[in-house]
């Protein structure tokens, strides 16, 4: 048998080749941009955002559209430092009897849904006024990975027909330098669309809330750039 073809020689050749290739593989892996895959949503922010959506569906008839209360029906929840988390959870779970009754949601909602409502009501207790009327994003809108994800989606779904690539030069108004586009307006317009002279389709049925928030993050980023 030829010396070069012996099993021991082949093993040594494989180990030498692996030693040469491993640093190259690591270099390629490290060269992948950090924003190639968007990070997961912050757990607490995601819970607050989900709790807000559930609150809007279940609780606003009594507690008001932003937790600001309804006279004679339910107290406000904004700026309530007197409501500890344990009390919030107990009230949501067991409800309340008396002059202003409240249904026991613990018999209807699962543990995750209860946790999300608790997170949002606790968040309301730390906010007031216009702060509490804004929709809550499930992550930091300044996160570069989320902005880049929104950029990619914007150029695929929004740029070709109406808004122009990178938010300029389309049939619709440019986004660069826009300081009047609030978080609430941006999210609700993308979610619900718009009718009138400038028609826009509702993306709420096609994109997840998280994907819409990534678009909002990108629009907010464009608003920080100088207008063209």
Image (cartoon, helix red, strand yellow):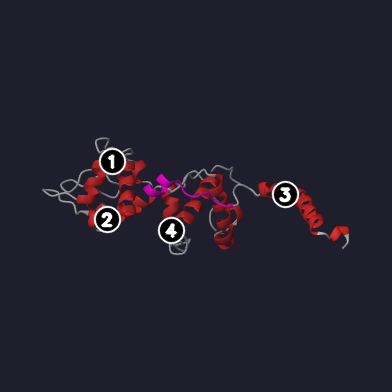
Residue 177 seen in the figure:
no
| Callout 1 touching callout 4 (CB < 8 Å) | no
| Residues at marks 1 and 4, CA–CA distance in whole angstroms | 31 Å
Q: Which residue is mark 1?
A: 85
Q: Which residue is mark 2?
A: 58
Query: Taking 61 as reference, is 5 left or right?
Result: right
Q: Position of residue 158 (x, y in %)?
A: 55, 59
Q: Quadrant of the N terminus?
A: bottom right
Q: Dot 1, how many residues are within 10 Å of its Cα: few (below 14), some (14-19), or many (20+)?
A: few
Residue at 28%, 41% in the rendered image: 85
Q: Earlier in the sequence, mark 1 or mark 4?
A: 1
Q: Position of residue 92 (x, y in %)?
A: 24, 49
Q: Earlier in the sequence, mark 2 or mark 3?
A: 3
Residue 39 seen in the figure:
yes
Q: Secondary structure at mark 4?
A: helix
Query: Taking 191 as reference, is 148 left or right?
Result: right
Q: Is residue 63 magenta?
A: no
| Residues at marks 2 and 3, CA–CA distance in whole angstroms | 56 Å
Q: Earlier in the sequence, mark 1 or mark 2?
A: 2
Q: Secondary structure at mark 2?
A: helix
Q: Which residue is mark 4?
A: 191
Q: Is residue 40 magenta?
A: yes
Q: Position of residue 196 (x, y in %)?
A: 43, 62
- Give the residues in magenta: 37-48
| Residues at marks 1 and 2, CA–CA distance in whole angstroms | 19 Å
Q: Nearer the viewer, mark 1 or mark 3?
A: 3
| Residues at marks 4 and 2, CA–CA distance in whole angstroms | 20 Å
Q: Secondary structure at mark 1?
A: helix
Mark on residue 162? Answer: none
Comparing 147 with 15, the one in front is 15
């Amino acid at each position: 048998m030829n010396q070069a073809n012996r099993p021991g020689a082949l093993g040594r050749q494989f180990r030498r080749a692996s030693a040469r290739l491993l640093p190259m593989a690591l270099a390629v892996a490290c060269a992948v941009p950090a924003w190639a895959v968007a990070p997961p949503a912050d757990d607490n922010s995601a819970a607050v955002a989900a709790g807000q959506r559930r609150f809007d569906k279940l609780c606003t008839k009594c507690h008001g559209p932003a937790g600001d209360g309804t006279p004679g029906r339910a107290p406000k929840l904004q700026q309530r430092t007197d409501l500890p988390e344990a009390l919030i959870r107990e009230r949501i779970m067991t409800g309340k009897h008396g002059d202003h009754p409240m249904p026991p949601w613990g018999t209807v909602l699962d543990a995750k849904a209860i946790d999300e409502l608790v997170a949002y009501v606790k968040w309301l207790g730390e906010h007031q006024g216009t702060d509490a009327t804004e929709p809550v994003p499930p992550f930091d809108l300044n996160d570069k990975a989320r902005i880049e994800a929104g950029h990619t989606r914007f150029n695929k779904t929004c740029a070709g027909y109406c808004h122009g690539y990178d938010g300029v030069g389309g049939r619709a108004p440019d986004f660069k330098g826009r300081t009047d586009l609030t978080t609430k307006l941006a999210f609700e317009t993308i979610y619900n669309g718009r009718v009138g002279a400038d028609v826009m389709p509702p993306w709420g049925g096609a994109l997840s809330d998280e994907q819409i928030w990534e678009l909002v993050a990108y629009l907010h980023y464009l608003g920080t750039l100088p207008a063209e």
